[in-house]
Amino acid sequence: MAQQLLMPKATAVWLVDNTALSFDQIAQFCRLHPLEVKAIADGDSAQGIKGLDPVSTGQLSREEIARGEADSNYKLKLQESRVRVPEAKRKGPRYTPLSKRQDRPNAILWLVRSHPELKDAQISRLVGTTKSTIEQIRNRTHWNSTNLQPMDPVTLGLCSQIDLDLEVQRAAKGLPPVEPAGDTLLPASQTENLLEPTDMGVAPPDDEIDADAVFAKLTSMNKRGSDEDDED
């Protein structure tokens, strides 16, 4: 909700007729030009307009008027009104200055290529265009398609980086999660103890060797060799 003065010209008429405030003070409070306030006082302007008492509407107190009458440099302060005036909401696409409108097709082409996840309504909000123009650029049916060059709308000054990032984040929320492509490494918990040391050509630890069995095998081999020599 915006706090603003109700019926400024009617309020100025009342202040001129009922107070000793200066033209500059009334102009500052009612957001009018001092010459327009003087014209009201001279009867050259606002003829037929009934004055609106700002005290009765709660926008100005009598104490505030008294302070202004005592000091011609005092600036009247608007009190909170009993009537709340809603802020005017902007409707339609974003306004684009005439000097930058020729760059909008290039910006649309950049958005369509760089952020295909953006919807037409989001692109329209960012650069202030129509859905039909976006569709023509998507389908390459725009009258100037052959000459279009993709250009960042932020660089062109058509929107801010914050606005662009916000729209991209909104569009990304509706996309499905991306599955990893190709084979991936197994976690360590699944690869531990899959191979025995002997499978990799690695001898078991020393504490696992049976010394008696090795000694007996060597003795048997030596004895077998001695028997073969005797036979020769």
Image: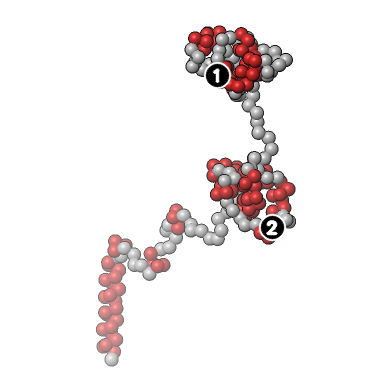
Give how far across and how far down residue 119 sits, in percent.
Answer: 66, 46
* Residue nearer the viewer, 131 or 37: 37
* Camera sees residue 85: yes
* Residue nearer the viewer, 32 or 142: 32
Q: Quadrant of residue 169?
A: top right
Residue tagged by mark 1? 24
Give how far across and how far down residue 129 sits, in percent.
Answer: 68, 45
Report helix, strand or loop for mark 2.
Answer: helix
Residue located at (55% from left, 17% from top): 25
Give how far across and how far down residue 90 sits, in percent.
Answer: 65, 33
Spatial separation of the CA atoms under disc 1 and disc 2? 56 Å
Instruction: State left or right for residue 61 relative to residue 6.
Output: left
Closer to the chain start, of discs 1 and 2, is: 1
* Camera sees residue 11: no
For the C terminus, the image quarter is bottom left
Residue type highlighted by circle 1? Asp
97 lies above or below 4: below
Count of all numbered marks drawn on residues in the image: 2
Give how far across and how far down residue 208 sits, in percent.
Answer: 32, 62
Q: Quadrant of residue 22?
A: top right
8 lies above or below 151: above
Residue type highlighted by circle 2? Ser
For the N terminus, the image quarter is top right
Residue tagged by mark 2? 145
Report helix, strand or loop for mark 1.
Answer: helix
